[in-house]
Image: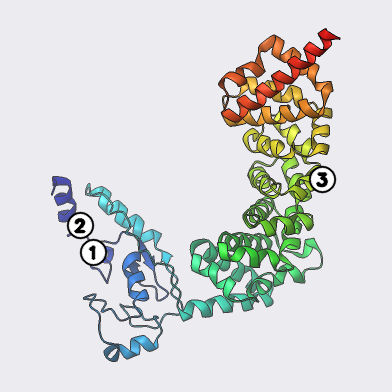
Amino acid sequence: MNNNTSSNESSTSTCPQEFRCPISKEIMRDPVILSTGQTYDRLFIQKWLKAGNRICPKTQQTYDRLFIQKWLKAGNRICPKTQQVLSHTILTPNQLVRDMITQWCKNRGVQFPSPLQYSDEDGLTEADRDLFLSLLNKMSGRETEQKEAARTLRSLTKRMPSFRALFGENLEAIPQLLTPLCQKKTHGEIHPDLQEDLITTLLNLSIHDNNKKLVAETPMVIPLLLDALRFGTIETRSNAAATLFTLSALDSNKSLIGKSGGLKPLIELLEEGHPLAMKDAASAIFNLCITHENKARAVRDGAVKALLNKIKNRVHVDELLAILAMLSSNQKAVEEMGDLGAVSCLLSLIKETNCARNKENCIAVLYTLCYYDRTKWKEMREEESTYGTLSQVAQNGTSRAKRKANGILDRLNRAINLTHTA
């Protein structure tokens, strides 16, 4: 044992009683508050609750059910210290106590102990399920109740994967959650905070893989997400875009979102250029455009112009260039790129960037333009003659970039030879 460890153990052994967990009797690493108001170390109260109250809070020994029948009847809802039945088993961080312990350790030159992790910390009890149903029922109540319940559900579904899973167990849960948004007849009637909390809760739910299909196929979900994309606060719009991105991990959802008109508001959000929302919008567009039919929809809805304008201004080049390269398999997109000056933009970007992937995407688009639009050959030949841009990629690019660059050079050289022969 080293001196620092000995010093730490000696110092923490003298710490105030209120800094010790009532269960472990050790200094608390991650103090949390139970519904009774008592503070415990997270790891030990999680073990206590998960053990079905069959653990003695003083000795951590396991007892026969017959001797603790009153604890079991409470359904994992007994506070170890007060023996009170818990209204729920949600653990709230006690930042005040944590700060006090941190300061106490600092004053004595003791390193604050790192929190211990409990691998099964997200188990739910009947009390938690009751809380879940109660919060959903409040969605049909007064606006103040709706706002409070929405805020709580947003927090719970962010922190606890098991709360996300609860929505998958109850087919009526998502419609109940969205009741306030469905009740409002005009966008002005929806309280911005309420809309933001509900849309963000949908985002949290969609992270859970087993929920993706259920969330997307609930009839009101995608229309409400598209409304939020158009009329919400920037935070709400960003989270709506992030939800569509997450849902689009499933191919069936890509098709559903595309058919529902999801690409146009995403492209409009991208065009607006708000820093908070652009990346989420771009990620959603990229995922959706993996399918052929959505590429056509994106082109029809103005994606090419929006992408090129941002790339020319060097905004989110990595993400937007990847989308442009994906769209270059669409004939109409290629024609539009040629008309909007994509060749000069991409050639200048190749010279500027040190990113191999960006060079590769630029060359991929130029390759397609070269094969579809002979009017762009002259501009490419002049660039190559002056700067050797294509040759440099052919020599130093990724394997795909080399192949595409050599393909362009071969095409241009054959065109020159044909001209000389004629």
Q: Which image quarter is the C terminus in?
A: top right
Label 2 secondary element? helix
Say which label, 2 or 1, has the lower sequence index.
Answer: 2
Q: Return the residue at label 3.
A: 301
Q: Which residue is mark 2?
A: 12
Q: Residue at x 79, y 19 (%)?
A: 377
Dot 1: within a 10 Å radius of its alpha carbon, few (fewer than 14), some, or many (20 or more) residues?
some
Q: Which residue: 13% across, 49% down?
A: 1
Closest to the observer, 371 or 325: 371
Of the image marks 3 and 2, the number of the one nearer the N terminus: 2
Q: Which mark is residue 195?
A: none
Give the amino acid type for the residue marked by disc 3 in the picture: Asp
For the image, the number of numbered tags is 3
Q: Residue furthest right?
A: 422
Q: Residue at x 26, y 90 (%)?
A: 67
Q: Secondary structure at mark 3?
A: loop
Query: Which residue is tagged 1?
Result: 26
The answer to whether 33 is drawn above or below residue 112 in the figure is below
Quick one: 39 or 75, which is closer to the camera?
Answer: 75
Q: Quadrant of residue 172?
A: bottom right
* Dots 2, 1 in contact, CB < 8 A: yes
Residue 274 percent across, percent down from the top left: 68, 42
The answer to whether residue 314 of the structure is visible from this angle is no
In the displayed structure, would residue 247 be above or below residue 348?
below
Q: Amino acid at mark 1?
A: Glu
Which residue does the image show at 36% across and 72% down from the upper left?
38
Looking at the image, is mark 1 or mark 3 nearer the viewer?
A: 3
Q: Residues within 10 Å of mark 2 (few under 14, many from 20)?
A: many
Question: In whole angstroms, how far apart are the C-alphas of marks 3 and 2?
Answer: 64 Å
Could you give the CA–CA distance between mark 2 and mark 1, rounded to whole angstroms? 8 Å
Q: Along the polypeptide, which appears first: circle 1 or circle 3? A: 1
Counting from the top left corner in percent of width and height, residue 211 is at 60, 65
